[in-house]
Image (spheres, grey):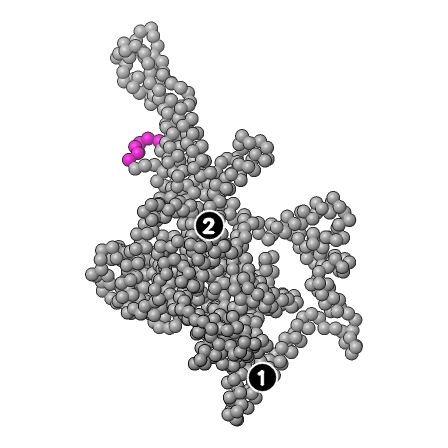
């Protein structure tokens, strides 16, 4: 986590307290549909103006990488025009280096709740393990990345930044399946980089952008088919010219996802015991005099409100619009489970200009002129060498008299002989055999391309003047350092993705369900969250709820786990060759890191033969569990059950326990209905449960999780044809 800045006054770019950020916005104002659409139209034109320069430069860069626009307009068509571009090779070099060192999201706790609260999970083998909230979040993030195919999306956005100067990532939600209402988080990239428009932002990760649009130009007939209830006729008659051209052009209608970040006033309360809460969190638990109803008193007396202050927090609203109509989300908008807009820029080299513009440069932007000159001089050399066979004939004028037509066709015809006058024989003027000047200029331009991109021959595997390994590596490091801006900016963007996920995880995964988490080694564990249980007094409570604690996100780049495992195995093999006595000590780890079939089973066998003092507590427990499973028949003479049978028995016991819990809950409800006294006691117990969730009554049952936030389920995902009506609202394909 970066150090707080006196200028910025906050630690994280997506901090929820708007009062600590520059450009403090006013709280969200109520607007009718006409006012909202007018604001959207004005912002769309403003955003178009902000991005026009970068869009044009990126388009020219991308075309240039593909071999287009490498000759200026007006160049003679009848001359040789070669395109000997290496731009695509240079781009792929930087992209390939990044793929060998992929950034990974790491979640770190910033308080005791995030590191101390333990959750119980189950491995694929049935072994129970404990993990902190931060470890659970990190496992959920890895699973989201795996389910989203995030590596491919990171690669696309990075490629866009390298060849055009900018790319985009986004986070959205979708239904996990067609059987229930559970949702999941998804990471995606934006294929059409020119379809995203944002308001101005200061942070390089875009966390402070006030609004964003993701647009799709749709044929008019397709628009009418998808949205038959939209206003017919000329949708954009009467609009200013700039707004009309943005929202409708060439018979197409622009449909856009519009996301805005608005401020919401909150009242922050400081209690006499030092705890901080929003007033909305305490709700009906505050007495008129500020005392907390039902809270156990402290040594200083009853717990009450000590101080209060107004603050501003953030929420993000989503709508799908045209310049004339709100298609989905309504005037109120759908609230997304984020505190900042889930659109993340992946940027190239950034240069801030005096007029306030920021230009984002690609890798090849300043190599285009040297590349054009390289094409020119190679073409000139080729043309000159091609004309060597057509060199002119030189001789006295009288030698050609009477035979001019024969000599004019001497370079194109197949004459067996040429006639001439006099004793002096005409000869060809061949000139220099090789166009040295042109070739030298082409070589100079090739070196200029290398200087402009910072990528030299040794970086792409070609032989160079460097002969020692240290010199070659030094040149490679120089190239990597020159272009480190691109992977560094990708890491910053992925960190922002991690912050968005951590912000949304407790809001999306807020129902009773079983999640599959992934470890760094790719192995999965199963975590049951938000489990409904019966509290000590028979009232319902929630076990293993997410959302306890505060977290920060960092990104670490390096070889993937498989590469690290191979390096570890190789290193341990070298150590064992130098010191064979260490083989009985590290042999199991060495074999476990090798990549061949049944390596883990052989490592487990070696572990059983090792001195138990060398094993970790988890490894010893696993061996003891296996030993118990393989014991002789039990006291009743029957063979011991297998691990699968034991798991089935445990599952059956859990079902029986759940049935008993349900029965106890039913009996408790009947007892509450029989007497007013028991009803009052139940209400008091419910209040104590709320206090327990706030940390006032350890051991009391936790409250039920809050209702999930209404949000667009398939935001940004490909959209099938819609039924005439229904609750599902999904944005268009990118």
Secondary structure state at the residue bearing disc 2: helix
- The image's mark for residue 489 is 2
Q: Earlier in the sequence, mark 2 or mark 1?
A: 2
Residue under circle 1?
537
- The image's mark for residue 654 is none
Visible in this render: residue 613?
Answer: yes
Q: Compare residues 506 and 651 and report the one nearer the observer.
A: 506
Q: Compare residues 106 and 402 and report the one nearer the observer.
A: 106
Secondary structure state at the residue bearing disc 1: loop
Residue at 52% in and 48% down: 99
Residue at 45% in and 48% down: 159
Give how far across and how far down residue 70 sits, in percent.
Answer: 36, 38
Q: Compare residues 627 and 611 and report the one nearer the observer.
A: 611
Whether tag 2 and tag 1 are in contact, CB under 8 A, the answer is no
Image-quadrant location for residue 421: top left
Label 2 neighbour load within 10 Å: few <14, some 14-19, many 20+: many
Magenta range: 74-80
User: Which circle, 2 or 1, is nearer the viewer?
Assistant: 1
Q: Main secondary structure of the magenta part?
A: loop
Q: Residue furthest left?
A: 238
């Amino acid at each position: 986590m970066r150090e707080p800045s006196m200028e910025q006054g906050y630690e994280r770019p997506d901090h929820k307290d708007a009062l600590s950020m520059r450009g403090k916005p006013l709280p969200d104002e109520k607007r009718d549909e006409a006012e909202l659409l007018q604001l959207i139209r004005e912002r769309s034109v403003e955003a178009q103006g902000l991005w026009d320069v970068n869009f044009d430069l990126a388009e020219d860069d991308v075309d240039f990488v593909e071999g287009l626009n490498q000759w200026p307009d007006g160049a003679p068509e009848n001359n040789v025009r070669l395109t000997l571009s290496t731009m695509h090779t240079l781009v792929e070099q930087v992209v390939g280096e990044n793929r060998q060192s992929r950034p990974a999201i790491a979640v770190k706790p910033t308080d005791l709740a995030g590191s101390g609260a333990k959750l119980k999970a189950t491995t694929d083998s049935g072994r129970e393990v404990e993990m902190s909230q931060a470890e659970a979040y990190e496992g959920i993030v890895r699973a989201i990345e795996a389910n989203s195919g995030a590596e491919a999306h990171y690669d696309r956005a990075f490629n866009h930044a390298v060849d055009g100067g900018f790319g985009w990532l986004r986070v959205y939600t979708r239904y996990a399946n067609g059987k229930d209402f559970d949702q999941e988080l998804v990471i995606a990239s934006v294929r059409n980089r020119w379809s995203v428009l944002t308001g101005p932002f200061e942070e390089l990760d875009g966390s402070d952008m006030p609004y964003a649009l993701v647009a799709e130009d749709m044929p008019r007939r397709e628009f009418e088919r998808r949205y038959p209830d939209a206003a017919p006729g000329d949708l954009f008659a009467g609009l200013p010219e700039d707004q009309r051209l943005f929202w409708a052009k060439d018979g197409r209608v622009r449909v856009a996802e519009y996301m805005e970040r608005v401020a919401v006033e909150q009242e922050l309360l400081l209690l006499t015991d030092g705890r901080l809460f929003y007033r909305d969190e305490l709700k009906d638990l505050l007495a008129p005099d500020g005392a907390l109803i039902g809270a156990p008193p402290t040594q200083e007396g009853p717990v009450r409100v000590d101080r209060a202050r107004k603050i501003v927090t953030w929420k993000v609203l989503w709508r799908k619009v045209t310049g004339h109509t709100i298609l989905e989300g309504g005037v109120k908008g759908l609230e997304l489970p984020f505190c900042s807009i889930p659109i993340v820029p992946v940027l190239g080299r950034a240069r801030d200009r005096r007029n306030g513009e920021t230009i984002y440069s690609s890798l090849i932007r300043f190599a285009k002129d040297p590349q054009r000159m390289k094409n020119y001089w190679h073409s000139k050399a080729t043309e000159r060498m091609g004309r060597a066979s057509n060199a002119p004939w030189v001789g006295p004028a009288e030698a050609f008299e009477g035979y001019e037509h024969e000599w004019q066709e001497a370079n194109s015809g197949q004459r067996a002989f040429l006639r001439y006058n006099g004793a002096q024989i005409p000869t060809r003027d061949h000139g220099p055999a090789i166009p040295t000047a042109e070739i030298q200029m082409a070589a100079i331009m090739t070196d200029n391309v290398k200087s402009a991109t910072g990528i030299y021959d040794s970086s792409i595997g070609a032989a160079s003047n460097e002969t020692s390994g240290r010199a070659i590596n030094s040149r490679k490091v120089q190239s990597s350092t020159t272009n480190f801006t691109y992977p560094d900016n990708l890491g910053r963007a992925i960190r922002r993705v991690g912050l968005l996920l951590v912000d949304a995880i407790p809001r999306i995964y807020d129902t009773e369900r079983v999640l599959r988490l992934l470890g760094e080694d790719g192995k999965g564990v199963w975590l049951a969250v938000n489990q409904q249980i019966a509290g000590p007094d028979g009232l319902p409570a929630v076990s293993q709820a997410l959302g306890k604690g505060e977290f920060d996100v960092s990104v670490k780049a390096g070889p993937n786990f498989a590469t690290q495992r191979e390096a570890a195995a190789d290193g341990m093999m070298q150590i064992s060759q130098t010191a064979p006595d260490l083989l009985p000590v590290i042999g199991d780890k060495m074999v476990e890191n090798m990549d061949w079939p049944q390596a883990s089973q052989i490592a487990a066998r070696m572990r059983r033969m090792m001195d138990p003092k060398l094993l970790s507590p988890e490894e010893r427990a696993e061996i003891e569990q296996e030993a118990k499973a393989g014991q002789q028949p039990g006291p009743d003479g029957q063979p011991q059950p297998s691990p699968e049978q034991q798991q089935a028995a445990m599952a059956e016991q859990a079902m029986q326990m759940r049935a008993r819990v349900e029965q106890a809950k039913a009996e408790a409800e009947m007892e509450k209905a029989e007497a007013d006294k028991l009803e009052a006691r139940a209400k008091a117990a419910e209040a104590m449960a709320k206090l327990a969730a706030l940390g006032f009554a350890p051991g009391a049952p936790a409250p039920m999780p809050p209702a999930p936030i209404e949000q667009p389920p398939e935001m940004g995902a490909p959209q099938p044809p819609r039924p005439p009506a229904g609750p599902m609202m999904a944005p268009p394909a990118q």
